[in-house]
């Protein structure tokens, strides 16, 4: 845990290095802070405040004990400060004599990884993928120049594996580590997904020269498509992939064969993921603007989804599941992130809906001004988050970690070379990280520490932390936006 830094930082230094979420109050309701911030700050709910079951679930995961958060008659609502939490623990207000998991999340979620950045690596080609392993001990970065690097986070970011991809077409589009962290699959714009032994002794892994990169052939009949998204199942037995031939593929690694192919959408399937640990539900997002839910247990008709979710006006670039088989988020070329509850899905998409009265291609054009305020007439999402830019490439978004934040935030890369962090419940932008010179396609929040790593088309892989590691951060760079045709 990161509570040790509470004893090494001065109160003044800590208070002013927090994100804007932290408003210091006194140790008890109604008292005055000794550090110049009144305790009677009133927090009105913003207009886009999420009044839904997930807001209560998020509060249960990341909120303090009800005794501390209770609003007394005649008092205004104030945030529960870290100092108040510590004082309450010492006084055993909760009766437990310790912090609960939600208490820990409440404290840690205030300290966003906004300091820095500090350099991890610099390459001469664009970075397309950056992801922590499930336990945070490894970090994967994939680059356009056929390179995939796996770093050992616990050993000073030493390169654990330097992989040279096989059958590269254009770029490495996606990677996924197996749950046991022994294997990595990577995809490019080809119908073959390759698998690498991460646990082998060799650091250099050149396809079929120093090591074998086994190929998982998804189609023997059609080699004219690519894979945009690939994910391991929770138990590591299967791999799911979304492709440019409008289909979803599921490959059984134990049987070493393709177990399922679904003609899922009317356009590219840009993102797929398993909904939860069971592996029964699959979410998919496509350039046909739809998100779909697939239940492998009960295909009522061939290639018919369990449900469809409408709301985006342009193609879906990425999906991230909350892991509970109920909620997920999607990033879209309509410049928004949407939060979905699959209980609101319909059996089919509304037909004959056409919103565009303009020509636009996100790969080289800016989003039209007249389209920014257009709303879908059948929007089934429960919340929308705007401010970032989804242009030129399939930019990704995620829930913040459950362990340290209770999934209280949503974060995303952006074409404007920034990272945006939104509060899931209030919808407010709580942080904007600026350093890179070009598009940030992917970024990843450490599962337990207040650390976030971003990778960009400028070739830089950098880490953001709270409270930092004592090193001087990198100087800001001039933003460089390239306008060319990219996937």
Image (tube, rainbow, N blue to C red):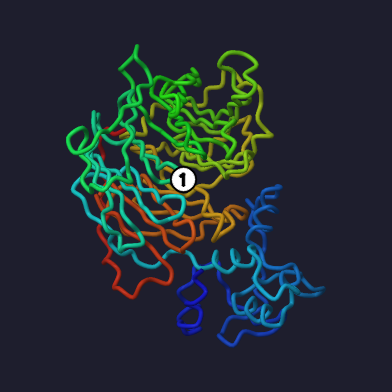
On the image, the x and y values in percent for residue 423 come to: 56, 56
Q: Up-down: is 70 above or below 480?
A: below
Q: How many marks?
A: 1
Seen from the viewer's position, the closer of residues 114 and 172 is: 172
**Is 234 displayed left or right of 117 in the figure?**
right
Instruction: Tell me if I can see residue 287 in this picture.
Output: no
Secondary structure beneath label 1: strand
Which quadrant holds residue 310? top right
**Is 333 displayed left or right of 92 in the figure?**
left
Seen from the viewer's position, the closer of residues 96 and 76 is: 96
Please give the residue where the numbered disc 1 appears in the rendered image.
397
**Is 463 displayed left or right of 101 in the figure?**
left
Seen from the viewer's position, the closer of residues 215 and 467 is: 215
Which residue corresponds to the image point at 51% horizontal and 39% vertical from the top-left?
235
Farthest top residue?
221
The 10 Å Cα crowd at callout 1, few under 14, some 14 to 19, many 20 or more, is many
On the image, the x and y values in percent for residue 129 come to: 34, 44
Instruction: Tell me if I can see residue 437 in this picture.
Output: yes
Q: Up-down: is 136 above or below 331?
A: below
**Is 56 displayed left or right of 12 in the figure?**
right
On the image, the x and y values in percent for residue 297 come to: 63, 24
Farthest bottom residue?
34
Q: Up-down: is 390 above or below 119?
A: above
On the image, the x and y values in percent for residue 245 come to: 40, 19
């Amino acid at each position: 845990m990161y509570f040790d830094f509470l004893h090494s930082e001065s109160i003044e230094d800590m208070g002013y290095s927090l994100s804007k979420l932290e408003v210091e109050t006194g140790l008890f309701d109604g008292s005055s802070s000794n550090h110049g911030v009144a305790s009677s700050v009133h927090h009105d709910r913003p207009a886009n405040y999420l009044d839904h079951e997930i807001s209560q679930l998020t509060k249960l995961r990341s909120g303090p004990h009800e005794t501390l958060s209770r609003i007394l008659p005649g008092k205004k609502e104030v945030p529960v400060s870290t100092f108040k939490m510590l004082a309450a623990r010492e006084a055993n207000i909760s009766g437990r004599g310790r912090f609960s998991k939600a208490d820990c999340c409440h404290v840690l979620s205030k300290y966003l990884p906004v300091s820095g950045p500090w350099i991890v690596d610099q390459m001469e080609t664009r970075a397309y993928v950056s992801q922590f392993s499930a336990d945070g001990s490894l970090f994967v970065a994939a680059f356009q120049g056929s390179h995939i690097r796996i770093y050992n986070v616990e050993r000073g970011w030493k390169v654990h594996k330097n992989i040279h991809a096989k059958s590269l077409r254009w770029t490495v589009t996606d990677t996924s580590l197996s749950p046991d962290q022994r294997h990595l699959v990577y995809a490019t714009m080809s119908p073959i997904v390759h698998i690498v032994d991460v646990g082998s002794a060799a650091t250099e892994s050149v396809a079929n020269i120093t090591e074998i990169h086994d190929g998982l052939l998804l189609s023997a009949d059609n080699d004219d498509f690519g894979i945009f998204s690939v994910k391991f199942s929770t138990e590591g037995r299967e791999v799911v992939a979304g492709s440019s031939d409008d289909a979803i593929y599921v490959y059984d690694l134990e049987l070493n064969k393709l177990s399922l192919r679904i003609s899922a959408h009317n356009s590219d399937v840009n993102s797929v993921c398993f909904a939860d640990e069971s592996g029964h539900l699959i979410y998919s997002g496509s350039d046909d603007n739809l998100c779909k839910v697939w239940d492998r247990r009960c295909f009522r008709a061939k290639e018919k989804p369990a449900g469809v979710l409408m709301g985006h006006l342009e193609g879906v670039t990425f999906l991230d599941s909350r892991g509970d088989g109920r909620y997920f988020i999607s990033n879209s070329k309509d410049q928004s992130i949407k939060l979905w509850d699959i209980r609101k899905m319909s059996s089919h998409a509304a037909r004959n809906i056409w919103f565009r009265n303009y020509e636009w291609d996100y790969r080289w054009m800016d989003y039209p001004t007249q389209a920014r305020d257009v709303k879908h007439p059948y929007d089934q999402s429960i919340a929308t988050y705007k401010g970032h830019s989804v242009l030129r490439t399939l930019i990704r978004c995620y829930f913040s970690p459950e362990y340290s934040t209770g999934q209280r935030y949503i974060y995303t890369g952006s074409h404007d070379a920034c990272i945006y962090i939104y509060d899931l419940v209030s919808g407010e932008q709580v942080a904007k990280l600026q350093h890179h010179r070009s598009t940030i396609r992917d970024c990843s929040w450490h599962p337990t520490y207040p650390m976030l790593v971003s990778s960009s088309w400028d070739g830089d892989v950098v880490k953001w932390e709270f409270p930092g590691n004592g090193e001087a951060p990198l100087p800001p760079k001039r933003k460089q936006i390239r306008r060319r045709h990219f996937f």
